[in-house]
Amino acid sequence: MGKEQSIPSSFRAGALMVALLVVVNWPARANDSAAELSIGGLQFVRTNDVAMESEDLHVALDRISVRYQFANLTPKPVTLTVAFPLPDIDLSEAENIALPSNDPVNFVDFETKVDGSPAPLTIDQRAMIGDKDVSALLRELKLPLLPIGNREIRVADLPGATRTRLVDDGLLMPAGMSDNGRQQYAPGWVTRTSALRQQVFPPARSVIVEHQYRPSVGSSPDTILRPSLRRSSALAQEVARYRKEYCIQDAFLAELDKRAGSGQANTAKLQERRISYVLKTGANWAGPIRSFKLTIDPGGSDRLVSFCPGRLKASSSTGNTLEYIASDFKPDADLKILVIGTF
């Protein structure tokens, strides 16, 4: 899991907003748009001894919850390392990323249970510049590894010797000039966080593992898919990416056009929300996932949802939610969900 390797989502969100500003001549700032982080479920080492009997995944804008049922296929207990890796946070782009919590360690408010009882994980957090671990230096200087919320580093308030050392070691990077002509700096490291524990799977019985967390939700105060923007040649490449990445269908666009109208201004006040979920780690088991269910809750019946279902089959719609199911499911792609509506 982690950032996409082609074009960082934070860069694309900023580029999208700049393009929108050019096309519609908004006075808004480019950082009104926030990029989502790609987060997923628990990760286990690859094994042929344990099968995933079922996975029930519920995706909402404010909460993701997953219920797994595992079966030990051997006559002996099997112990596996369980990890919940959080996405790497590149602090040079952090202001463009949607972080759901101000907790500098568990920044998605992750919780897990095993057979109904809380199961704490050991949190490991490191600061990296390339392959170099710079955590010890930051701790020596009493600086946070993930400076968010009330732990944000005020570089101007640092002692001169500390600031010089951080600059010399590449932990602070030049970030433009202030209004009075002084050099400004921003953190230049990547914060890497994961939660770990050992899980025992007893023989001859199932184990239920549940977890939930607050997702990182990308947002934009407009949508590139409104007809007046969608038909702009300046946005053609980005629109093509949306069509491919979210499997946008003609029926989806037709309904969007009804709501948006053909005017240049966003009079319907439509916005985007985007969620990225790492699903491919569900392929680490003995055989496919025997029963898989996905529930998407966009939070309102008037919101449009699009994603690439792959082998998932639509099951039913209950209230505002959409349900998809699959048997003997081996995920070969991650989920990228687009929600358009008023929020």
Image (cartoon, rainbow, N blue to C red):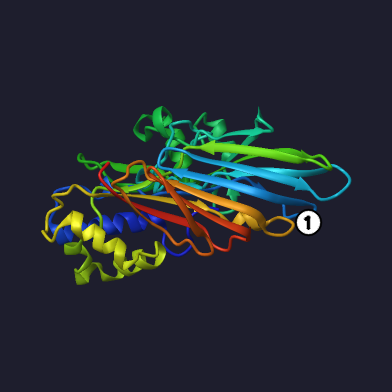
Image quadrant of residue 210? top right
Q: Give the residue drawn at x 19%, y 68%.
A: 232
Vertical side of 35 occupied by 213: above or below = above
In this view of the protein, which residue sits in the foreground, 214 or 89? 214
The total of numbered circles placed on residues is 1
Residue beneath disc 1: 48
| SS type, badge 1 | loop
- The image quadrant where one finds the C terminus is top left
Q: Give the residue drawn at x 26%, y 70%.
A: 236
Q: Residue furthest right?
A: 75
Q: Is residue 149 visible?
A: yes
Relative side of 333 to 101, left or right: right
Q: Residues within 10 Å of mark 1 (few under 14, many from 20)?
A: few
Image quadrant of residue 284? bottom right
Measured from the top left, where is residue 16 in percent x and y? 28, 58
Vertical side of 92 occupied by 237: above or below = below
Relative side of 330 to 204, left or right: left
Measured from the top left, where is residue 123 in percent x and y? 62, 35
Q: Give the residue drawn at x 64%, y 44%.
A: 68
Measured from the top left, where is residue 137 in percent x and y? 56, 37
Measured from the top left, where is residue 24 in percent x and y? 14, 58
In this view of the protein, which residue sits in the foreground, 221 or 254? 254
Q: Is residue 224 visible?
A: no
| Amino acid type of the residue that numbered disc 1 sits on in the rendered structure | Asn
Vertical side of 90 occupied by 8: above or below = below
Image quadrant of residue 260? bottom left
Relative side of 70 to 84, left or right: right
